[in-house]
Image (tube, rainbow, N blue to C red):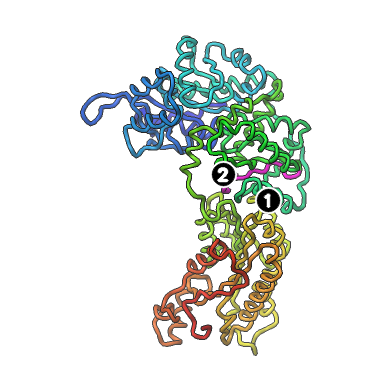
Amino acid sequence: MESLWNDAEAANFQGDLALRVYTSRLLGRDKSLVLHGGGNTSVKIRERDLVGEERDILYVKGSGWDLEFIEEAGFPGVHLDHLLQLSQLKVLSDPQMVNELQTHMTRASAPAPSVETILHALLPYRYVDHTHADAVLAITNTGNGETRIRELYGDQVVVIPYVMPGFDLARLCAERFPAERRASTIGMVLMNHGVFSFGDTARESYERMIRLVQQAEDYLAAHGAWELPPAPTRAPRTSRRAQIADLRREVVRIAGFPLVMRAHQTPRAIAFADRPDVAHLSQQGPATPDHVIRTKRVPLLGSDVNRYAADYRAYFERHAPRAREPKTMLDAAPRVVLDPNLGLCTAGRSAKDAAIVADLYSHTMDVIERATALGGYQALPERDIFDVEYWDLEQAKLRKSGTAPQFSGEVALVTGAASGIGKACVRSLLARGAAVIGVDIKQDVANVHSGTEFLGIVCDVTDAATVSAAIERGVGTFGGIDMLVLNAGVFDGGQMIAALGDDEWRKVMGINLDANLTLMRECHPLLKLAPQGGRVVIIGSKNVRAPGPGAAAYSASKAALSQLGRVAALEWGGDGIRVNVLHPNAVFDTGIWNDDVLAARAAHYGISVEDYRRRNVLRTEVTSRDVAELAAEMCGALFAKTTGAQIPVDGGNERVI
């Protein structure tokens, strides 16, 4: 653990709050200290208010901000004198505490202050840092953790037994910290929770944190508990998609709503899942209760999903009197699954949530193995874990979270995703909350979207092996395929039949028809497992119903594809899969069209380009987005009872009508 302080960087941060931002970001860069919004920092500043009076203000990290990327706006200011008065109360409920914090902020639009704001206020130091350092957690999560912490730090820290974050913890610290603080004290350890450091400057507080964590790392190393067990190399299974999709279905069944599942088949994850004592270690609980809301209880072996559900329900029954609104708040599904073949599988309402859980549990594995090597991993009792999950503040977050996006927890695969209608379909599905696998022969498919909800794969859809590999990768990333949008296609450039060569015919048929048969066949077992039922949308063409001269291969391939879709609707209805076809026409913002082609076609008809774009019954232009929005809606509830349909999206074509 080394200090990342850099004088040149620090010079760009002028003022107390700006330096608070800088050192907070330094902490956030190190994932062994804080992860995904964990930890918090603060600074006490004297300021003059609008009426000229000087006030002491505590600026503390606000809810929703990540230390790695925090700005000054992420630190709400709260009147320090009021916080100190609150710290002297005997009792203060969490809802009352939140109200007091928010009604005594200096800026109404600021984010909600941390639940540990009162604790930061009562510590008599200008700067306060708080992390969930892995090394400290590894020591505290042992049977004699407190003894070891006192042996390690002596008077450098005040040791506080575990109490759930909030007013009760602040009150306990208000009683014990002044009595146990010594001249050499530079920090505070909250057992099974984390470590605090403090100082008169941002640099002093930050570097004291680094010093305390380095001491913990050195202690682990001295006791043979720092180096993690080597991960043996093992060849991955040739195909995991069926097992991953089956596992996801079981987890979703327990949850009662769709979840994305990410499989991490790394040597490290497989080695941990393959430990002979993993069932004991993994069932104890998280490294810190702060992680329980994200990791959602203990992990389990993949083969034990059904047993886990029964155990959890029995567990909930034992604690039901303490829970609020159990029918609406209970979510019995695991967020972490350990399997010797699949490694670490993590689930979430979105791909981002699943990735966060994976990050948290990867660090939890480090803590568990180091604590085990130190003498035995021992997490907090079950009672404390339950209290955090059904904490008033967490239940309030659930109530405020609102309705999930339409396709939250679901996965779509879109072909031809790098441009035109396919790219628009990616965006429409992402906007509705889906995780999307986009495949295209073009290299820039990877750049269609930059978030964790999208996976772009370069893939030649006419190569069955490449298609299979792309599906394997997509299922490993998101857990399954619930929606399939078959969009990839090619236009043969206007060859009349008399001049149409065999190679050109086969090329068009191979891309527009044969490749889609392969995709449907490969995806069928996955679509059968879709939590809301599988959905297939085929992008056909107006030419199916109204062909034109010079498009024999294109028209025939799209007609055959439409027939393939109709047969699939008949064959797959019993599997809960619906298959529908969209027939667009004259969608000019695609790769087929450019300004020169548009001008030539408009001149051919003796009309302007603008009129040519609107050459339909409704006199409207049809865009890729128009087609994509309808394709996405066809995967939604409005079309839940529609299959085998062929729907035009062409502004009205006289020949079709």
Residue 306 x %, y %: 72, 43
The residue pinned by badge 2 equals 353
Residue found farthest to the bottom: 498
Please name which of the two marks, 1 or 2, marks the residue nearer to the observer: 1
Looking at the rendering, which quadrant does residue 70 occupy?
top left
Foreground residue, 446 or 257? Answer: 257
Give, as a three-letter code, the residue at label 2: Asp
Q: Is residue 318 shown in magenta?
A: no
**Which residues, given as a range, are shown in magenta?**
341-354
Q: Is residue 8 visible?
A: no
- Extreme left residue here? 51
- 233 vs 365, left or right, is right
Q: Nearer the viewer, residue 250 or 445?
A: 250
Return the residue at label 1: 249
In this rendering, position of residue 183 left or right of residue 565:
left
Specify the quadrant that holds the N terminus: top right
Q: Quick one: 206 or 381, which is closer to the camera?
A: 381
Please say if the residues under marks 1 and 2 sit with CB atoms less than 8 Å apart: no
Answer yes or no: is residue 476 visible. yes
Picture coordinates of residue 408, whole percent (x, y): 55, 52
Numbered disc 1: secondary structure: helix
The 10 Å Cα crowd at callout 1, few under 14, some 14 to 19, many 20 or more, is many
The kind of residue tagged 1 is: Arg
**Residue 445 lies in what quarter of the image?**
bottom right
State the CA–CA distance, disc 1 to disc 2. 18 Å
Residue 299 vs 519, above or below: the answer is above
x, y percent for residue 102: 37, 33
